[in-house]
Image (cartoon, rainbow, N blue to C red):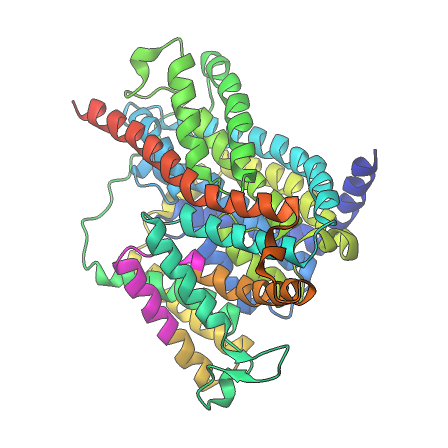
Amino acid sequence: MQTFDLLMQGLLVAIQPMNLLYALVGVTLGTAVGVLPGIGPALTVALLLPVTYKLDPAGSLIMFAGIYYGGMYGGSTTSILLNTPGESASIVTALEGNKMARAGRGGPALATAAIGSFVAGLIATIALAFIAPWVVKFALSFGPAEYFALMVLSFMTVSAAFGESALRGLTALGIGLALGLIGIDLQSGQSRLAFGVPDLLDGVEVTTLAVAMFAIGETLSIAGQGKRAPDQIEPVKGSVWMTAQDWARSWKAWLRGTLIGFPIGAMPAGGAEIGTFFSYAAEKKLTKHPEEFGNGAIEGVAGPEAANNASAAGTLVPLLTLGLPTSATAAIMLAGFQQYGLQPGPLLFTNNSSLVWGLIASLLIANFMLLILNLPLVGVWVKLLAIPRPWLYAGILLFATLGTIGANPSVFELGMLLAFGVMGYVMRRFGYPIAPVVVGLILGPLAEQQLRRALAIGQGDPTVLVHSPISATLLLLAFLALVVPLILRARGRGRVLAELAANED
């Protein structure tokens, strides 16, 4: 009953007029950026970090969460109508969704994606509310060694889960950890890697790095691709409403997708794309219409989209309770917490209970808002696909620069923004993931502090890091987090490539 009481208190925070406005702005922006190919929720949250620096923490974080949920909703529109997934988690939706759109059934495909996202988001958010307090109780027993092991788990998670190669992920993480060393050492008071530059004594600003790597780097990457042929948008023919048969074939897929997506999203080595691969494979095995798979099976849209949105709520479990980001957007949201002096983890639930439960409750409200936005206004979102890319990315470049100047009016900070933006472009060019750099900068100094404390308690004996069963288990999980995604990704991609080959034949 305590969880219900806390959730009700959170609803009182979430229904405050300004917080409702933040939620509406978040889900609207999230849907819009989800629809636009190549612009994901991580980039949008990164752009808004400097802009929201002086706003209310609860409202800003509610808006960021709304962007995250909305981006997952909007990504299906691009996959179905353009056959171009805006997010990696929407790849599987394109397999069946675009075939349905070509056959004149784009409306029902968009409807089952939206309603499935709503059902999955609702169930997964309630699950988040009930699971989070149990994880917090467990985490309150952590000491310095356990926290250090947890940070190592986080490092391995983001290094292995993002990008094509674990080695490249670890290299990107190393860059982030090196950047985290810049500035004054909090324990000794000595300057490190500042090279006599006074502006570097405070360290590298997380917001500057995030905006540069995600927004400036992406803009330069798109510009570097040169001219492309215009995208072929499939028009939505007929009604967006589903028939009775569509409902009968979709509702079980929604529930199965939720059950698959939420636990995978909550796993430290999870990820939305893994859940969607598994959901698609499950629907193909359980369907009564196997001949439709590869030609536009509605279950192949319903299940993966539900898994996609359930995993988004699942990702918030390790982020809020342990401070573990398992997606690029979660990494940027972690930076959002830190810009207000908040560190996600068990103490956040104790010291900032109203903020956390207000955030969780706002996700329930955001789900209803998204259902209303996605079904009747699908025509509006389709028109966004016609925005010329040069205009779009020029606007992002301008917004990123103005936001950085507003948060920190300094010529040196603008130089850092440009330098990190170029670094982001180079990393994209050679296939290095971006999220580990941001996570390394945020969590690196915290991991260093916990390591020093643990070694001080153990009088310099490094085995103190594995004396506790919890820390030993977390370090083992860190090793598995490096290995398991490689296996799962290889299996999942193998299935999808087989599907694509079969469809081409």
Report how many numbered discs are placed on residues in the image: 0
Q: Residue at x 26, y 58 (%)?
A: 430
Q: Position of residue 192 (x, y in %)?
A: 50, 81
Q: Position of residue 95 (x, y in %)?
A: 31, 29
Left or right: residue 103 versus residue 358 is: left
Residue at far top of view: 288
Quadrant assignment, res 80: top left
* Closer-to-camera residue (498/61): 498
Q: In this picture, is 290 found above or below 118?
A: above
* Closer-to-camera residue (179/214): 179
Q: Residue at x 53, y 65 (%)?
A: 444
Q: Position of residue 134 (x, y in %)?
A: 72, 39
Q: Position of residue 241 (x, y in %)?
A: 47, 23
Q: Is residue 122 visible?
A: yes
Q: In this picture, is 185 found above or below 4?
A: below
Q: In this picture, is 380 found above or below 188?
A: above
Left or right: residue 233 versus residue 68 is: left
Q: Quadrant for the C terminus, please.
A: top left
* Closer-to-camera residue (124/478): 478
The magenta segment: 419-436
Does the magenta run of residues contain 431?
yes
Residue at far left of view: 505
Q: Residue at x 56, y 68 (%)?
A: 445
Q: Quadrant for the N terminus, please.
A: top right
Q: Is residue 396 visible?
A: no
Q: Residue at x 47, y 57 (%)?
A: 44
Secondary structure mostly seen in the magenta stretch: helix
Does the magenta run of residues contain 229?
no
* Closer-to-camera residue (160/28): 160
